[in-house]
Image (cartoon, helix red, strand yellow):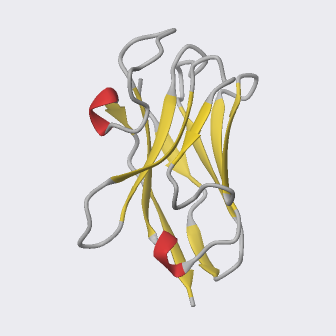
Amino acid sequence: VQLQASGGGLVQTGDSLRLSCTAPGRTLSPYAVGWFRRAPGNEREFVAAVSWTGRYTEYADSVKGRFTISKDTGKNTVYLQMDSLKPEDTAVYYCATPRERNWTPTSYSRSSTYVDWGQGTQVTVSS
């Protein structure tokens, strides 16, 4: 599944952004979707994930209570609503899916769960 992440930008501390993950020409409906990020000089880290049913979500402790992941099957889009942004949220954000359809992974937070990755969208939060 080819993925496209969008919605990034330059914002100030405390602002909000909504990232979108789409799959042009394919459906995201049967896939779990994860969001990861990579800040300069850091390794890629897990941010949030939603199950293929859309009923289960998981978050990194660093974003819990501030970020919300959701799946809109009708729009074939997975969103990452980011509120109360902090400078430490600055990174390139990627969405990803596993190969398997209708599948519940053992770990949503492990990057090895996912095989298809979008190109990333830059989020910069100024202090």
Report which quarter residue 93 is drawn in: bottom left
Q: Position of residue 65 (x, y in %)?
A: 69, 57
Q: Between 107 and 20, which is closer to the camera in this rendering?
A: 107
Given residues 8 and 35, the one toward you in this image is: 35
- Residue 14 appears in view: yes
Q: Is residue 51 above or below residue 44?
A: above
Q: Residue furthest bottom?
A: 127
Residue lying at 56% horizontally and 52% vertically, measured from the top left: 6
Residue at 52% x, 61% y: name it: 62
Vertical order, 51 against 8 (above or below): above
* Image spot of residue 111 (x, y percent): 31, 38
Quadrant location, the C terminus: bottom right
The residue positioned 50% from the left and 51% from the top of the image is 60
Residue at point 46% right, 10% down?
Answer: 101
Residue 90 horizontal side relative to residue 64, left or right:
left
Task: Report the side of 39 relative to 86 (left or right).
Answer: left
Query: Residue lying furthest top in this view?
Result: 102
Task: Identify whether 114 is placed above or below 13.
Answer: above
* Quadrant containing the N terminus in the rendered view: top left
Judged from this view, the residue extending furthest toward the right is: 74
> Relative to 122, is 12 on the left or the right?
right
Residue 115 makes an appearance in the image:
no
103 displayed left or right of 113: right
Q: Is residue 33 above or below residue 73?
A: below
Query: Across the whole image, how many numbered discs are drawn on residues?
Result: 0
Locate residue 12, reporting x and y percent. 64, 83
